[in-house]
Amino acid sequence: MDIWTFISEKIHSGARIFLLYVLESQGSSPGRRGFKMAVASDGSFTGTIGGGIMEFKMVEKAKALLSNGQFELEATYQYHDKAHGTDQSGMICSGSQFLVFVPLSAAELPFVQSVMAALREEKPVSLRVSPEGISLAEYLADEWEIRSEKDWISVESLKKQPVIHIIGGGHVSLALSELMRYLGFYIFVYDDRPGLSTLKENHFADEKFEVDYNRAGDWLKAKSSDFVVIMTVGYRTDKLILRQLLGKNFFYLGMLGSENKIETLMAELKAEGFEEEDLAGIHAPIGLMIYSQTTREIAVSIAAEIIMEKNKNLPGGRGQK
């Protein structure tokens, strides 16, 4: 939403905008499909198309086009190597990206407002862009065909903000909430302890609840696209929550704990008759192995694993670090 808010405000102030939009990326390109950046005629800009010297060059190009009165849609390849005679980005990470400069001014304000409304209301819509211009399509799709700089089309779904449910409001929960807020997630936090100080201090969560852990099925309204993390005060309540969530469909289900704790808990659940298939889908112990010591380091390891799971099957996702 931030980039569209920026565009709307700049158009209202009388500025013209170039939306720099990555439609395709290959190899180790720093700018992935869907990356966007807005450059205004007053020199301000927001967003990113991958950073580095390539982004600097493209921002300067957009400023020059706006300054010279050249305000037409155009597309260009950027190659991140020294092998291509033209369109070198200045980077050597290999790969390439196909970038479009989309002009936006007062005439496109209704379109911009429609995009913002669709994002707020979580409507199933997509951005459609081609040499003829940019528009909003009332369906979800992710498809593109790039034949040349003059012959291409792209449709990208405007996905809603990713959602994470953190069950447990302690110190790691507070640190994780801060990170996930920075990463653009909508955050729910739950705990069963009245007046918990770390829950009160958690200004990063979008919604906080004092709940009865015995009734997790009633208050946890997580969808199949949501991330769920269990980090309650101890073994008993972790197991209580997990037993109620097994078999439900989430994009990601993880639980905090030592290897010994997890092994013991899993063995008990198997003995109680829970299916191996359901237990195998749990990320536990949660987080990447980075030898975390502090609560914030633990939060970093968890956030890194969530990012990996969220992005690894996206176009161009594998192999990125």
Image (tube, rainbow, N blue to C red):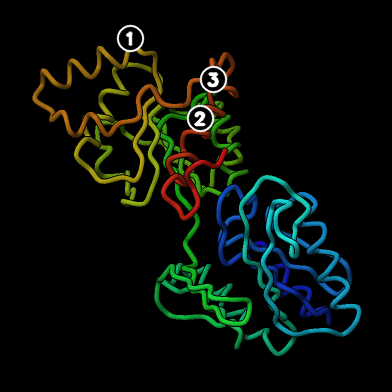
Q: Is residue 93 above or below residue 234?
A: below
- Gap in angstroms between the C-alphas marked 1 and 3: 18 Å
Q: Which residue sits at x=70%, y=54%?
A: 83
Tell me the element at label 2. helix
Label 1–label 2 contact, CB within 8 A: no
* Residue 100 spot, x, y in % from top left: 66, 72
- Tell me the amino acid under the disc marked 1: Asn
User: Which of label 3 and label 2 is nearer to you?
Assistant: 3
User: Which of label 1 and label 3 is nearer to you?
Assistant: 3
* Residue 142 spot, x, y in % from top left: 43, 67
Q: Is residue 289 above or below residue 320?
A: above
In this picture, residue 96 sits left or right of residue 224:
right
Q: Residues within 10 Å of mark 3 (few under 14, many from 20)?
A: few
Residue 269: image quadrant is: top left
Task: Say which of 147 and 186 sits in front.
Answer: 147
Q: Quadrant of the C terminus?
A: top right
Q: Residues within 10 Å of mark 1 (few under 14, many from 20)?
A: few
Disc sitting over residue 173 in the figure: 2
* Sequence-wise first label, 3 or 2: 2
* Sequence-wise first label, 1 or 3: 1
Tag 1 residue: 260
Q: Which residue sits at x=88%, y=67%?
A: 43
- Tell me the amino acid under the disc marked 3: Ile
- Tell me the amino acid under the disc marked 2: Ser
* Residue 297 spot, x, y in % from top left: 59, 22
User: Which of label 1 and label 2 is nearer to you?
Assistant: 1
In this picture, residue 18 sits left or right of residue 143:
right
Q: Residues within 10 Å of mark 2 (few under 14, many from 20)?
A: many
- Gap in angstroms between the C-alphas marked 3 and 2: 18 Å
